Image: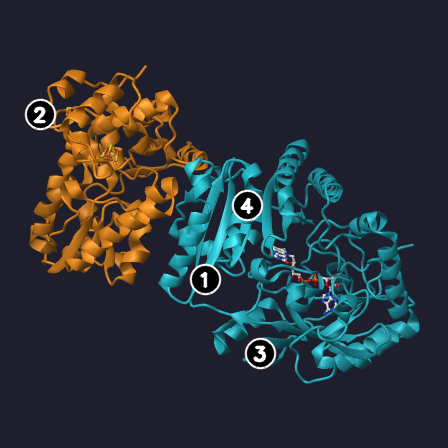
Amino acid sequence: MSNIRERLADIVGERFVSDKAEDLYFYGRDPGLMPAVHPDWVVLPETVEEIQGIVKMAQMEGIPVVPMGAGMSLSGLVIPQKGGIVVDMKRMDRIVDINEKARYVIVEGGTSTGRLNAYLNKKYPRLRFSIPDSPAATTVAANVMIHGQGRLTQQYGFNSDMVSGLEVVLPSGELCRIGSCAISNEWFSKGAPLPDLSGLFLGWFGATGIITKAGIKLYPRKLLRDVEIFVTDSPDFIPEIIYEITHTEMTEDINIFSQPLPLIFKDNHHVVIYFTGDSEEEIEFRKKTVFHSLDLFIRNKDGGFMSVGAGMKKSLLEMPQRNASTFADVTKGGGFEYSGPIITIDKYPQCTRKLDELAHKYDLKYHGTARIIGRGHAMMFAFSFTFNRSDADMLDRTRKALHEASQYALSIGGVFWKPTIDEQKMALQKMDPEFARLLKMIKTNLDPQGIMNPGNWESK
Amino acid sequence: MFDLKFDENLCLSCPTGACLVKCQYMELDKEQAKEEIINIFRGKDSPVLKECVTCYACEEYCRRGNHPFYLITQRREDKGILTAPRAITRQWVNIGEPKGKYEVGRISKKALSFGFMPQFLDITKGRLFEDVMPSYFFGQEFFCNVVYIHFGNTSVIKKRLPGVIKQIHDLGVEEVVFMHDECFAAFDSLGPAFGMQIPFRSVHYFQYLYERLQTLKDLIKPLDVKAAYQRPCSNRLCSETHKYLPVIMDMIGVDLVQRTYEDENALCCGSIFRSMFGYDLAADVQKRNIDDMTDNGAQYCIFNCHGCQNAMTAKIQARGIKPVHLVELCRMAIGEDPEKGV
Ligand SMILES: Cc1cc2nc3c(=O)[nH]c(=O)nc-3n(C[C@H](O)[C@H](O)[C@H](O)COP(=O)(O)OP(=O)(O)OC[C@H]3O[C@@H](n4cnc5c(N)ncnc54)[C@H](O)[C@@H]3O)c2cc1C
Ligand code: SF4
Ligand code: SF4
């Protein structure tokens, strides 16, 4: 374990390695609630070869390696549980290639969603990708790694479903291509028609390798977007409302929110429906179809379309939506965290009632959101709380509320999304033992020393 | 405690039944109209209570001093007949809830009321308003709450409006210029109709603009444009103010195009129809309304209500018509540039 700092400096250059206390302090935490653990070194590689060098050295020395994008996944996934090296991917932010006609782009492992967005805006205005509502600094590779969801998720599923190929540095330091790019120069598929090995990496939080390149699918970008909000006073109507809207296949995306403040939103549930089209006529036709799909609710007075003012419309149409970040600081003091299980839509009423109950029980400011995944195949329901970081009691209450929310979601058939290490343990305990054994077999084979983001998906 | 003043005898002797005969959303002859309104007054069931789309127009159609639409509203509430989806009503009731976030300028004897719409601060600038600004107020505490007649809900008005009257009175103003029809109507029509005393003088901003333009007439350069006017539902509650509109247009050199849907026949912006009844009625009314503007050569659509402006702006722009608030148009006529905030 001698001279690690120097050996890292040999690989990435003196400027891009640090073991300074202030850097280790910063890299030991994320904006969520998990306790900090400081790394021993931080490196910022620029090339695939440098990453291979880092991983090989770490392998030889048995040092943990934690890849990190923007570090904003909130659930402690970049906190180096056993110290070691944090590999900050931000310098690997190039757009490697794009195939316009086949609608995919290849980006490096640290390319931010903001950068890709700006690139497409400028060079390929007829193409788009699925942008999550996280800040623009968050990375494409991390987002597919954690099965994120963004715009278009209602049409095409999780962001990981939109992957079209991967290049990964394995825990051995070897470089491996996954998908069509394994036998061709084209990155159009992450698996089919070959065996789909992307599952050896996606969802593993870097515990089986570091993504150095990701191919992701691009989609037609229509000239116009618009938004409408259907409101109902009872969560019990939501599953049926979503079923009807998704049946039309007319929408870009569907989100749901409920929150007690500001007063305009109090006691109602808001189904935010996004539309796209290349002409006013196209959008109008889509809207008309969706409005009519909800006629029965309107006639029975169970729900209706609210007027959306110009200001609200503008903020809802932003990509990413900044109001997610604004809410994150409602309590002031910069704390924001959510438990966001993936769960079937029929559980919406239960989840929202539980959220209400938890917010009252623990006296917290809350916000319930759901993002529809696929044509109503599932949703991400976020039990979100904001808190003041300097208020220890509030931190404790938030932790308890989140823990209870997670347990509840699991008990009613939900599956954790980007779970904390504690939640991963809960999931491993509950899951089919053969599935857990398979996970273990994969992890042990790929990473026998357990150096890659240790703690994650580790079963006894 | 606040009961609607409604004189059944006026209806019994009414020569026209105009309130419902002229209704654009129901087909009733004179006898049926009178019978239904009397039925409603007497607390009986009436299809009108279900079918009325709350366009407010019968308040204008009745020229005999009765309040047919306030009556319909009151009876709907008595009978628990909902007009809008519950969530929409709830949302509106929440919007009007006082929040302690009101704003009061440097109040003098005369003041402008913006209701709860801060956007008026952006347009009440320049010479037209120099004799009153910065004497203004807005916020939920000063919100007239009249909009709840769309939702068959008079009790929230009866509960909140007396407090609003007191708030305004406590400012020490003698005369209030209301920038929104509904607010003016609250103190000029609805409040008095329900027996409320109003301790200040209410002036509609049409009258205010007319008087100011007369004072500033040397500055006026005729705009020489063709425009359609989008008359809002709430102007039906204070229909005597409508007479100022053609006069003002004349003063500033705007040619109001002749339309099918003007004056008493004006059509709603569609916003509230959409929220209450869904797609078809709103789409039909908007289409007829906008076709009528373009068919008659309007270059501008003049708005008097920000709600209408929000609901129609994109649609009229797509048809090549420019949206403009009446205040902005008057400011343009005296050489100001409202877009630059000059
Ligand atoms: C205000 C706010 C709004 C949000 N909204 C959304 C949303 O709408 N949709 C959504 O999906 N998420 C959302 N998130 C969660 C999260 O921020 C995003 O999913 C984001 O894309 C994560 O990216 P990151 O670069 O910050 O990931 P990080 O936190 O840096 O990393 C996440 C995980 O991926 C691993 N990892 C990172 N890079 C690599 C790599 N190259 N190879 C292997 N493993 C790697 C890390 O080790 C970690 O386990 C939101 C977060 C915030 C703060
Ligand atoms: S409300 Fe007016 S118009 Fe209608 S019947 Fe009575 S008096 Fe006539
Ligand atoms: S408010 Fe309009 S729709 Fe209702 S009865 Fe009066 S005129 Fe007819």
Q: Which chain is cyan?
A: A
Q: Which residue lies at the image location 51% right of the left edge and 57% below the top edge?
A: A249
Q: Where is residue B329? Give x, y as percent.
A: 19, 54
- Residue in front for this viewpoint, B153 or A30: B153
Q: Which residue is mark 3?
A: A102
State the quadrant of the C terminus of chain B: bottom left
Question: Given the image, on which type of amino acid does mark 1 rest?
Answer: Thr
Q: Which residue is mark 2?
A: B15
Going from the N terminus, do you reach mark 1 or mark 3 first?
3
State the quadrant of the N terminus of chain B: top left
| Chain of residue at mark 2 | B
Q: Looking at the picture, does residue B111 appear above or below residue A99?
A: above
Question: Given the image, on which type of amino acid does mark 4 rest?
Answer: Phe
| Chain of residue at mark 1 | A
Badge 1: residue crowd in 10 Å (few <14, some 14–19, many ≥20):
many
Horizontal side of residue B161 vs A323, given as left or right: left
Question: How many angstroms separate mark 1 from mark 3 (CA)?
Answer: 21 Å
Q: Pointer 1 and pointer 2: residues touching (CB < 8 Å)?
A: no
Horizontal side of residue A377 vs B128, given as left or right: right
- Image quadrant in which you'd find residue B134: top left
Q: In the rendered picture, chain B carries what hue?
A: orange
Discs 4 and 3 lie in a common subunit: yes
Horizontal side of residue A349 vs A169, given as left or right: left
Ligand 3 is located in which of the four quadrants? Answer: top left
Question: How many angstroms separate mark 4 from mark 3 (CA)?
Answer: 35 Å
Q: Pointer 2 and pointer 4: residues touching (CB < 8 Å)?
A: no
Q: Which residue is mark 1?
A: A276
Q: Where is residue B172? Give x, y as percent.
A: 27, 27
